[in-house]
Image (spheres, rainbow, N blue to C red):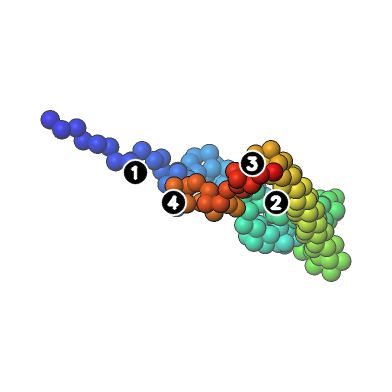
Amino acid sequence: MSKAKASPKAAVPAAKKKGGKKKSGLQGQLFLMGGIVMAAVLLASTVMLVIGMMPTIVAALVDRSARKTKAVTVGAMNLAGCAPFLFELWREGHSLTKAIAIISQPAAIVIIYAASCVGYLIDWAVAGIVAGILYQRGVTRQKAIQQRQVELVQRWGKEVTGDIPLDDQGFPIQQTVNMATAKAS
């Protein structure tokens, strides 16, 4: 009797397969349905947020990083720009005509999109600062390594540098200290 071996591919869960998509399940479907119902009930707010949060949608599509830091930064500032106009909509009557009237004001669009530009600037500045700090840490580490190499050469001799030519067996071709020269001194 021969035992049948299990295929190695069968051991990989469906969610971990390359190119495979995770199933959202019942919980995800309920969340999606709840979101659609809330968007329909709060249609005026939904219209205002969809138009106002366009820079965040673009940032989320453009950002290829795993953590989506650009989308988060732009989204936070974009939402901060939308907030005063959203509060105005809620205060003056939550209607679709009022939402369109607010969002069609040039000043409102300029303020909302300028806030998202501030998010882009924050992301750009922080990325530059972090890159500069990491570069300086790398330079400092490189100097420490070079200093350690000098100390090792002083302690163990030039042989540890790897600069001495070796024969086929790995022995130095040239001796750094010639025995005849050392006795003559």
Q: Position of residue 156 (x, y in %)?
A: 65, 39
Give the quadrant of the N terminus. Answer: top left
- Which is nearer the N-term, disc 4 or disc 2? 2
Name the amino acid, label 4: Asp
Can residue 98 be seen here? no
- Which is nearer the N-term, disc 2 or disc 1? 1
- Write down the residue under mark 2: 69
Query: Marks 3 and 2: in contact by CB < 8 Å?
Result: no
Residue shown at 81%/59% (left/top)? Answer: 121
Front position among marks 3 and 4: 3
When asked about the image quadrant of residue 14, the answer is: top left
Name the amino acid, label 1: Lys
Distance from Cα at disc 1 to Cα at disc 3? 70 Å
Name the amino acid, label 2: Thr
Q: Position of residue 61 (x, y in %)?
A: 63, 60
Identify which residue, 180 or 92, lies in the foreground. Answer: 180
Front position among marks 1 and 3: 3
Front position among marks 2 and 3: 3
Query: Marks 3 and 1: in contact by CB < 8 Å?
Result: no
- Write down the residue under mark 3: 183
Identify which residue, 167 or 140, lies in the foreground. Answer: 167
- Write down the residue under mark 4: 168
- Write down the residue under mark 1: 9
Asked if residue 30 is positioned above or below residue 133 in the image, the reply reads above
